[in-house]
Image (spheres, rainbow, N blue to C red):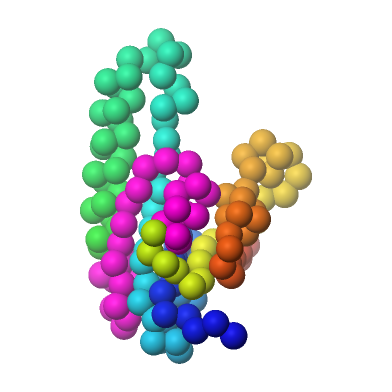
């Protein structure tokens, strides 16, 4: 088995992110690994041309990223106290950015949540986790939250 020295923990900063963080922290402690915690702010460039000026979209994305950076800093401080961890907010399509960050940080494992969508929701919204699993060269651990809670 390959040694796990660096874990990429991909979060959506939702209410279920703490559960995903628990798994990443547990694994980091077991392996003595460092953790990069990443949130991918949505890419809204696809909406340029829909009677929305590009400057409005850029401002909106800037506000999302700024808010996410503050939330990320607080989240990492609260949930990753026991391990060496750094939080990063990136901008783009989530699956692509997660895979890019895994490569950039030389991660040995990706830990991420899944919404557990089924049926038409899955068809309409797709699955970031599925795209990451299919596109990753390293192991991916997906955590499905208990949706009954």
The answer, for residue 149, to whether it is visible in the render is: no
State the residue in front, 104 or 80.
Answer: 104
Pinpoint residue 25: horizontal percent, then vertical percent.
41, 78
Residue drawn at x 38%, y 64% is 105
The answer, for residue 146, to whether it is visible in the render is: yes
Confirm whether the magenta stretch covers residue 79.
Answer: yes
The correct choice, above or below, for 53 with respect to 148 in the image is above
State the residue in front, 143 or 5.
Answer: 5
The correct choice, above or below, for 11 with respect to 81 in the image is above
Pinpoint residue 18: horizontal percent, then vertical percent.
43, 67
The correct choice, above or below, for 137 with respect to 95 in the image is below
Pinpoint residue 30: horizontal percent, then vertical percent.
45, 89
Q: Residue furthest right?
A: 119
- Displayed quadrant of residue 42: top left
Q: Residue furthest top?
A: 51
User: Which quarter of the rendered picture does the N terminus lie within?
Assistant: bottom right
State the residue in front, 149 or 24.
Answer: 24
Confirm whether the magenta stretch covers residue 53.
Answer: no
Callout count: 0
Residue drawn at x 33%, y 25% is 57
- Displayed quadrant of residue 143: bottom right
Residue drawn at x 35%, y 77% is 34
User: Which quarter of the rendered picture does the C terminus lie within?
Assistant: bottom right
- Displayed quadrant of residue 140: bottom right
Residue drawn at x 51%, y 71% is 109
Pinpoint residue 87: horizontal percent, then vertical percent.
30, 62
The magenta segment: 75-103
The correct choice, above or below, for 46 with respect to 88 in the image is above
């Amino acid at each position: 088995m390959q040694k796990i020295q660096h874990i990429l923990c991909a979060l959506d900063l939702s209410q279920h992110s703490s559960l995903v963080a628990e798994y990443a922290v547990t694994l980091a402690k077991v392996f003595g690994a460092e953790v990069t915690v990443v949130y991918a702010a949505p890419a809204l460039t696809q909406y340029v041309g829909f009677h929305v000026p590009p400057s409005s979209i850029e401002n909106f994305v800037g506000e999302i990223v700024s808010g996410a950076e503050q939330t990320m800093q607080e989240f990492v401080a609260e949930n990753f106290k026991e391990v060496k961890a750094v939080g990063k907010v990136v901008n783009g399509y989530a699956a692509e950015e997660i895979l890019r960050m895994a490569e950039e940080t030389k991660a040995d494992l990706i830990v991420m949540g899944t919404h557990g969508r089924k049926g038409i929701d899955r068809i309409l919204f797709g699955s970031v986790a599925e795209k990451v699993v299919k596109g990753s060269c390293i192991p991916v651990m997906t955590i499905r939250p208990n949706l009954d809670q």
